[in-house]
């Protein structure tokens, strides 16, 4: 999760393979960009 205006952190999240899931206000009492990553199964 990154602050909405933190483009640099969003770029890092995407570069390491995270997927942008959209905007949320469920955390920290502010709008944030939500990212996730899928774990590979062995």
Image (cartoon, rainbow, N blue to C red):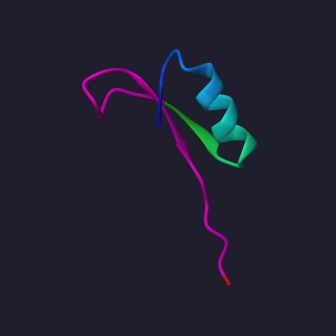
Quarter-wise, where is residue 8 in the image? top right
Task: Name the spot of residue 25 as percent of width and height, x first.
Answer: 33, 27
Classify residue 30 as left or right of residue 19. Answer: left
- Give the residue furthest to the bottom: 42
Would you say residue 39 sits in the magenta stretch?
Answer: yes
Position of residue 6 measured from the top left corner of the image (x, y, whole percent): 55, 20
Magenta highlight range: 23-41
Residue 33: percent from left, percent from top: 49, 29
Residue situated in front as seen by the camera: 7 or 33:
7
**Which quadrant holds residue 9?**
top right
Judge left or right: residue 34 versus residue 7. left
Indicate whether residue 9 is drawn in magenta. Answer: no
Left or right of 31 in this view: 40:
right
Majority secondary structure of magenta residues:
loop
Position of the C terminus, as image quadrant, is: bottom right
User: Extreme left residue here?
Assistant: 29
């Amino acid at each position: 999760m990154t602050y909405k205006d933190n483009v640099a952190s969003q770029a890092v999240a995407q570069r390491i393979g995270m997927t942008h899931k959209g905007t949320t206000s469920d955390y920290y009492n502010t709008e944030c960009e939500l990212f996730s990553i899928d774990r590979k199964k062995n």
